[in-house]
Amino acid sequence: MSRAIRTVIYPGSFDPLTNGHLDVIQRAARLFDRVIVAVASSADKNPLFSLDERRKLVDAATVAWPNVESGDFSGLLVEYVREMSADAVIRGLRAVSDFEFEFQLALMNRKLDERVETIFMMPKDTYTFLSSRLVKEIAQLGGDVSAFVPPEVKVALNEKFALQS
């Protein structure tokens, strides 16, 4: 008798993908058979990178993990979870301040579909301060972000901000 493939969705804007995100992805890849990094369209957030660029950066940064893939969604997360036949949603918690918002989202998702489970995962303590917003700000001001993002993302940030100069 074969075992069902366990799939988890890791949603976010990933604008840009950080080493904190990668830490969560890598650990999720050890726990699940299939990890879908679901890039939210986030048009209302006015992202620096397009949806296609963000997906390509996720794909480049996760190429070493064969059970990780990227996807994208624009509607309700629970609809995407159903569409992908996923078993759970994974969310990263950096600090206590993240918990309240994430907890509300998890409860709302459960209310919309009681089968959608949310798993909270904390990144390594070295990444608890890290956010995409801070990384973009440092890069825009000419700072070195190589300790905070994968090499592909550093190159993309440098190119993006060179074009804006």
Image: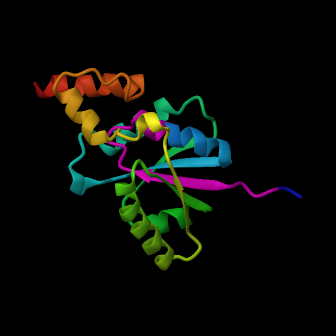
Percent x, y of residue 94: 41, 47
Quarter of the view holding residue 132: top left
Left-right relation of 38 to 101? right
Q: Residue furthest left?
A: 165
Please tell me whether residue 29 is drawn above or below residue 165 in the rendered image: below
Please tell me whether residue 40 is drawn above or below residue 154 in the rendered image: below
Please tell me whether residue 144 is drawn above or below residue 90 in the rendered image: above
Circle count: 0
Q: Which residue lies at the image location 24% right of the left edge and 45% below the top edge? A: 47
Q: Which residue lies at the image location 46% right of the left edge and 73% below the top edge? A: 107
Q: Which residue lies at the image location 39% right of the left edge and 35% below the top edge? A: 18
Task: Tell me where the magenta segment starts and ends, as one range.
Answer: 3-22
Quarter of the view holding residue 19: top left
Q: Is residue 58 visible?
A: no
Q: Nearer the viewer, residue 26 or 36?
A: 26
Left-right relation of 23 to 144? right
Percent x, y of residue 96: 39, 55
Q: Nearer the viewer, residue 117 or 9?
A: 117
Q: Is residue 2 visible?
A: yes
Percent x, y of residue 33: 68, 48
Is 56 a magenta residue? no
Is 7 a magenta residue? yes
Name the quadrant of the C terminus: top left
Please tell me whether residue 145 is drawn above or below residue 28 in the rendered image: above
Name the quadrant of the N terminus: bottom right
Q: Residue furthest right?
A: 1
Left-right relation of 142 to 101? left
Q: Nearer the viewer, residue 54 or 113?
A: 113
Quarter of the view holding residue 42: bottom left
Q: How is the image coloured?
A: rainbow
Percent x, y of residue 145: 31, 25
